Image: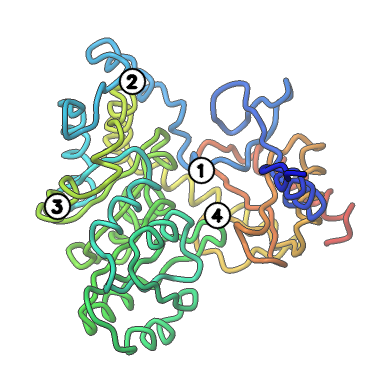
Amino acid sequence: MVKEPLGFVQDELANLQEQGLYNHIRTLEGPQGAWVTINSEKMLNFCSNNYLGLAADARIKAAAKIAIDEFGVGPGAVRTIAGTMTLHKELEDTLAAFKKVPAVLTLQSGFTANLAVIGALVGRNDTIYSDSLNHASIIDGCRLSRAEIKVYDHCDMDSLKARLEEPVSGRRLIITDGVFSMDGDLAPLPEIVELARRFGAMTMVDDAHGEGVLGSHGRGIVDHFDLHGQVDIEVGTLSKALGVVGGYVAGTKELIDYLAQRGRPFLFSSALTPADVAACTEAVRILAEDDSLVKKLWENGRYFKDAVQKLGFNIGRSQTPITPVMLGEAAQAAEFSVRLSNHQVFAQSIGFPTVPHGKARIRVMVSASHSREDLDYGIEAFRKVGKELGII
């Protein structure tokens, strides 16, 4: 009897259910915001990467509508053939000025930006040095490049130095997240840059969770550490704090020109839509002109973190508004999430493979759009569920 080729899928799904690792995907019935509607029920939103509340901002929506009227709904081609519009160049120029870099190249997402950069810069006979907790898009980009990958212990500069001292040939590329999204801690970027100089390596930082959060007006981790001109490649996203969708690479004019010639996702996938591009440009302008949303985000983050710590929860090593409430086993984190939803709080559990076994958590993402009353409501829900499950 011939075995059903996809028969393993059912077994794998059952295993995920049993281990508490099955991801029950929720459907929002309206816009992103401090509160969302799920299954016709209003829920306090502690899950979104919409840090600054810009995803439904009236100014950004208006910019998108104007772009549709003027440029249509689709780009019609890849950027290198007929898909580059004046809107794309305007966004790239606006981003370059905001990031204080010579040039920027935009792509379809932060994920594709990492795939575009890594494979274009290194390949066989080259070496990548990657933080052990780097994002999946970095990991996949490293694998696809076919370069040798040397993983160093998370944010451990002695470990990175030891890996750099190992004999290799070819190009060297050190890659790190700027803000590690599951823990909320920062890469020690000044030390990474110093080691890169000493060993002749390129430096690349993925600042997906630093954009709109760190630095002056949310310019990111390079600005936070005042390292302008010292980090070779910055990768960013337009889908988190900026509230829209897309990714980009920032660096020298020569780097950006090279990536436009060799970055495969740029070459072989259609451009961002006119509405998305115009919305992103407006979001960058809002940040450049006013940092009040960034300040409010940090104020809310500090308030929530202080409160849950006082309740007795462990929030790990976070240095940003990202708040991982550490719960241990995936099944317990999943149960905690379910009970929070009973209190109208939407906060998903996160377990393996996103985080290591035994380090499951509820990752709380507060935003600038949350009011003090919203935060107090969520804190009280955490207190009630923590008591119910005997955690605090």
Mark 1 vs mark 3: which is more N-terminal?
Answer: 1
Return the disc, 1 or 4, that comes first in the chain's sequence: 1
Report how far apart the C-alphas of labels 1 and 2 lie in the structure: 20 Å
Give the residue drawn at x 22%, y 84%. Answer: 198
Mark 4 residue type: Ile
Q: Position of 110 compared to 392: left or right?
A: left
Is residue 351 positioned above or below 227 on the image? above
Number of residues whose C-alpha sits closer than 10 Å to that of mark 1, classed few (under 14), some (14–19) or many (20 or more): many
Secondary structure type for disc 1: loop
**The image quarter in which residue 37 lies:** top right
Residue assigned mark 4: 322
Of the numbered discs in the image, which one, if any, rests on residue 258? 3
Mark 1: amino acid? Asn
Q: Earlier in the sequence, mark 3 or mark 2?
A: 2
Q: Nearer the viewer, mark 1 or mark 4?
A: 1
* In-image side of 95 versus 51 (left or right): left
Please name the residue that numbered disc 2 is placed on: 64
Task: Indicate the secondary structure of the residue bearing disc 3.
Answer: helix
Q: Secondary structure at mark 4?
A: strand
Mark 1 or 3: the one toward you: 3
Q: Earlier in the sequence, mark 4 or mark 2?
A: 2
Residue 83 locus on image (x, y percent): 21, 27
Q: Toward the viewer: 48 or 200?
A: 200
> For residue 156, what is the image quadrant?
bottom left
Residue farthest to the front, as pictured: 1
What is the CA distance from the residue labelled 3 to the residue labelled 4?
35 Å
Q: Residue at x 49, y 39 (%)?
A: 50
* Quadrant housing residue 119: bottom left
Q: Nearer the viewer, residue 338 or 294?
A: 338
Residue of label 1: 49
Circle 2 crowding by C-alpha within 10 Å: few under 14, some 14–19, many from 20: many
